[in-house]
Image (tube, grey):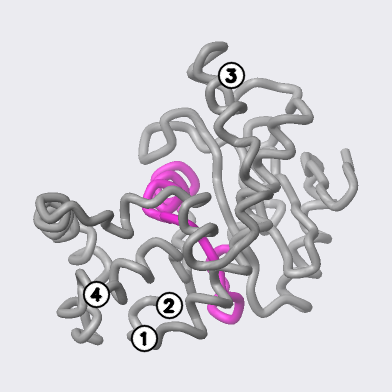
Amino acid sequence: MVTNQTEVVTELNRCAEIVTTLMTEESEVAVDAKGVNLGRTGPLTLLQVGTRDGQAYLFDVHTNKALLTVGYLKDLLEAKNVVKIIHLCRWDSAALIAQFGVVLNNVFDTRVSLMLNSHTNAALAAQSEVALNDVFDTRVAHMEVELSKGNVFPCMLKLSDMCETYGGNSATLAFKNDVKKDWWMETAAYWASRPLTPEMIQYAAANVSVLFGLYDNLSRKYVFPETLIG
């Protein structure tokens, strides 16, 4: 199914064809995942991959789990020569490792980039060898301090807030709150519902289409330790 610049992919041959093109022609891709209580045990049902020219591929893993293995999506996600731009990759990564044995490689996490480079975390940013796992472990303590001062901590920002503040097409995400409200009222297993509705497709595609603007602006504004991408 193709809608404008968004394609829903379920067939293995088509998936392999897309992955081959992406790994040959793209130096960075935007990635997001959807699922039901997404995490180690919460099933991943949809994987979105976006390109700079506005194309969004929605890989329907709920319909065909082999897309990640036989369809070679695993190769793309683990490739060291292609940057994966992700907003808060923690839960996506947990699901991919636990459910499919996929270990993300060469990741630029937009939310973590702000944590490392904000004035509230200057000390962390100065430690070029800091591990991202250590940042996750310490962010709660930093958050509590900043909240007590009345500050908004970067790791609390939603994707739409980050786009509005740090660059990215926030207007693209304007409809998302209404969609979220609808899906929580209808079913907690929204992203396991099939067929994908036009609203689901629009929502999923929007989440990757805005990431390039964030990536470009954050990359220009900040200098990152090498551990941020790896």
Disc 3: which residue: 182
Badge 4: residue crowd in 10 Å (few <14, some 14–19, many ≥20): few
Point out the image quarter for the N terminus.
top right
- Residue at mark 2 to residue at mark 3: CA–CA distance: 36 Å
Find disc 1 in the rendering and name its residue. Answer: 226
Is label 1 in contact with label 2 (beta carbons under 8 Å)? Answer: yes
Point out the residue furthest to the top here.
186
Q: Secondary structure at mark 3?
A: helix
How far apart are labels 2 and 4 at the CA level?
Answer: 20 Å
Extent of the magenta region = 75-101
Report which residue position mark 2 lands on.
229
Identify the image quadrant of residue 72: bottom right
Of the pair 201 and 181, the residue shown nearer to us? 181
Q: Which residue is the site of mark 4?
A: 119
What residue is rendered at 32% in x and 50% in y?
A: 156
Describe residue 5's horizontal placement relative to residue 83 as left or right: right
Q: Position of residue 42 (x, y in %)?
A: 42, 32
Q: Secondary structure at mark 2?
A: loop
Q: 153 or 37, which lies in front?
A: 153
115 within the magenta span = no
In this view of the protein, can residue 228 be seen by the observer? yes
Q: Name the residue at 36% across, 68% down.
A: 114
> Closer to the N terminus: mark 4 or mark 3?
4
- Please tell me which of labels 3 and 1 falls first in the chain: 3
Nearest to viewer (mark 2 / mark 3): 3
Q: Secondary structure at mark 1?
A: helix
Residue 129: x, y in percent? Answer: 22, 84
- Residue at mark 4 to residue at mark 3: CA–CA distance: 37 Å
